[in-house]
Image (cartoon, helix red, strand yellow):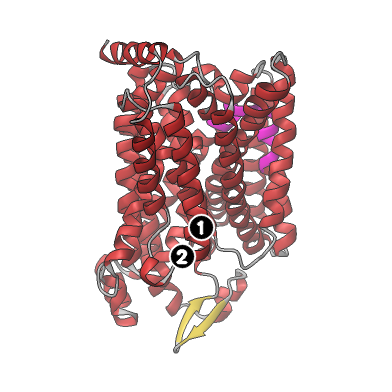
Amino acid sequence: MGLTTLITFIVYLIGMLVIGVIMYRMTNNLSDYVLGGRNLGPGVAALSAGASDMSGWLLLGLPGAIYASGMSEAWMAIGLATGAYLNWQFVAKRLRIYTEVSNNAITIPDFLENRFKDKSHILRVISALVILLFFTFYTSSGMVAGAKLFEASFGLSYQSALWIGTIVVVSYTLLGGFLAVAWTDFIQGILMFLALIAVPIVALNEMGGWSAAVQAVGEIEPSHLNMVKGVGIMAIISSLAWGLGYFGQPHIIVRFMALRSAKDVPKAKFIGTAWMILGLYGAIFTGFIGLAFISTQEVPILGKFGIDVVNEGGLQMLADPEKIFIAFSQILFHPVIAGILLAAILSAIMSTIDSQLLVSSSAVAEDFYKAIFRKKASGKELVWVGRIATLGIALIAAIIAMNPESSVLELVSYAWAGFGAAFGPIILLSLFWRGITRNGALAGIIVGAVTVIIWGEFLSGGIFDLYEIVPGFLLNLLVTILISMFGKPAPEIEAEFTETLTKLKE
């Protein structure tokens, strides 16, 4: 990386830390630290949700998958875009209203406990355990992505790159909490969007236009042009099923809870959906064009930028397909712009890690420490417990990420399935079905989470070659409904459900 690029990159990092310091002065209690005082505008909420959702996967994982396997990987993007839209359409407004009606819940475990009037705290504790388990893997995926970026850009060893990236993200999350996370996500969302528009456009121009790029890819590998050739029905279902995950992602749906008003949802939905669709297109085109582009470059030019290539069947390919966006940034752009584009990749990574650390630390502070050990803990005390938890979770995630062979996409897919299967059906049923009970919700969460773990570890492949979110989500739904049918919600639970519906119509 040239000096100019490095300076641009460092200026960006300093800017993110400055936001953390400013928001530190505005964070007075746990509600501020975890939910920003429920005061997010629609633009900030939408881009914050999108940026925390997409992570390094959008700029590294998806382009890498398209580069390596072709348009058959685009089914995942279709599933995600659909799921994100449905989440805004059906969950956002109800959850914003219901969490306020239900004793002003500020975390998902908090909402579930209040929603079902669970005085035993077992629903809160089990929910928090699921969050800590899967977010540790999810956070680890972001750290792998960050390490790959620092490794490729600065010529650092993987281990050094991993710890530098971890320190940067943890620093501003520790300082500013939710407000720092939301506002940095907003800026990072804009940066990611511009990068995903600029890179494929410049790359297409370099290739001589869309027709020339398609022709070049067709000559290299014809199957890359076809979305269905060589792709089984199970693979398509698995890819589309990523959309199911949205209903249970704590770091995304907490943005709905933080909106200043339910009336802001339509505007936020439009901004968030448009951002996502255009961003996914940009990521797909980046990976698609990359195959033709890299195969025609001279090895010394690639080596000048520290880009490793291998020979596969007489074809020059990236040693790590997930670095195609980094390669484009360094080869095609002026050093200042390259620094901004590399900052965009870091933005994608940081915006997800910070959200995950925040939700995880709030689970420790609100759902373990306060609920079980210190019911009368002060707001300041809980904020500091959250900050200490952030450090601990980040350390464990970094240790998991220390293997340089780790795949961003594999780690993300495991955690995404875990949350989608454990919480997705419960959130939907809690918002739309009056008859769901505490026992049904508890059983469903456990069954969903355990199914993902067992299916992913022992049953994937062969006749069970199906993304684990599908069986996990369906079994959770079935178990929750069946067990709930043997019980009856208390009158006060019914009253809150009715109050939510009334406010929804206002």
Magenta run includes residue 175: yes
The answer to whether residue 362 is above or below residue 210 is above
Q: Is residue 225 above or below residue 28?
A: below
Q: Nearer the viewer, residue 233 or 127?
A: 127
Percent of width and height locating residue 328: 48, 63
Q: Quadrant of residue 72?
A: bottom left
Give the quarter of the figure containing the N terminus.
bottom right
Q: Nearer the viewer, residue 309 or 115?
A: 115
User: Mainly helix, strand or loop, the magenta region?
Assistant: helix
Of callouts 1 and 2, which one flags the residue occurring earlier in the amino acid sequence?
1
Residue 210, by quadrant, is bottom left
- Label 2, residues with CA under 10 Å away: few <14, some 14-19, many ≥20: some
Q: How many marks?
A: 2
* Residue depicted at x 39% and y 66%: 464
For residue 459, which numbered disc appears in the image? 2
Instruction: Estimate the x, y position of residue 447 in percent, counting from the top left.
Output: 46, 45
Circles 1 and 2, Cβ within 8 Å, touching? The answer is yes
The residue wearing badge 1 is 454
Evaluate whether residue 333 shows in this view: no
How many residues crowd around disc 1 within 10 Å: few (fewer than 14), some, or many (20 or more)? few
* Residue 173 seen by the camera: yes
